[in-house]
Image (cartoon, rainbow, N blue to C red):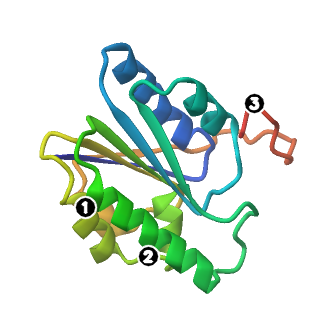
Amino acid sequence: MEMNVVTGNGKGKTTMTLGVALRALGYGMKVEVVQFLKGRKTGLVKFAEKYKDGLKVNQFGRKQFVMEVKEVDKKLAKDALTYVSSIKKADIVILDEVNVALSMKVVGLDDVVKAVRCLPKNTVVYFTGRNAPRKLCEMADSVVEVRYKKEPKYMKARKGIEY
């Protein structure tokens, strides 16, 4: 299994991994996106509903942005890991925002690693989100850090661009 971390304070971490997913889908590969801390119906979710052949997006989060961790967040994250460990056919698995879930202590690294180790051995896994734990980065085959050289002046997320 290949493990890749995409982290940093810049935007585009999920988008980068979705570029890999689109390429894989073009070759008929199977892609699973498991979203932690996300429950809002975004453009990605709408796209996956239309493109059902090879792409699955499963959300395990509340509709609102998580500022303070609640028990429901921990339960949803546990459900996400149970789901990950049940995946039997996927060429690529993207654990979207799992790094944030780890840094907020919604899930533990040992539990994430245990779930990922249940995946088929040829699966390529991506861990996205800010604040990836050092231990995860050390375990990974590759680590990409997305950083701003210049931040945009706008602060509000735009439909179709940031979500």
Q: Secondary structure at mark 3?
A: loop
Q: Amino acid at mark 1?
A: Glu
Q: Amino acid at mark 3?
A: Gly
In space, the residues marked 2 and 3 are separated at their CA atoms by: 29 Å
In space, the residues marked 3 and 1 are separated at their CA atoms by: 34 Å
Residue annotated with mark 1: 138
Which mark is drawn over residue 160? 3
Q: Earlier in the sequence, mark 2 or mark 3?
A: 2
Judge left or right: residue 14 versus residue 45: left
Q: Secondary structure at mark 2?
A: loop
Q: Is 73 situated above or below 62?
A: below
Q: Amino acid at mark 2?
A: Val
Which mark is drawn over residue 68? none
Q: Toward which corner of the image does residue 134 lie, by quadrant?
A: bottom left
Q: Earlier in the sequence, mark 2 or mark 1?
A: 2
Q: Secondary structure at mark 1?
A: helix
Which mark is drawn over residue 107? 2
Residue occupying the point 44% across, 63% down: 80
Q: Quadrant of the C terminus?
A: top right
Q: Residues within 10 Å of mark 3 (few under 14, many from 20)?
A: few
Q: Is 144 situated above or below 64?
A: above
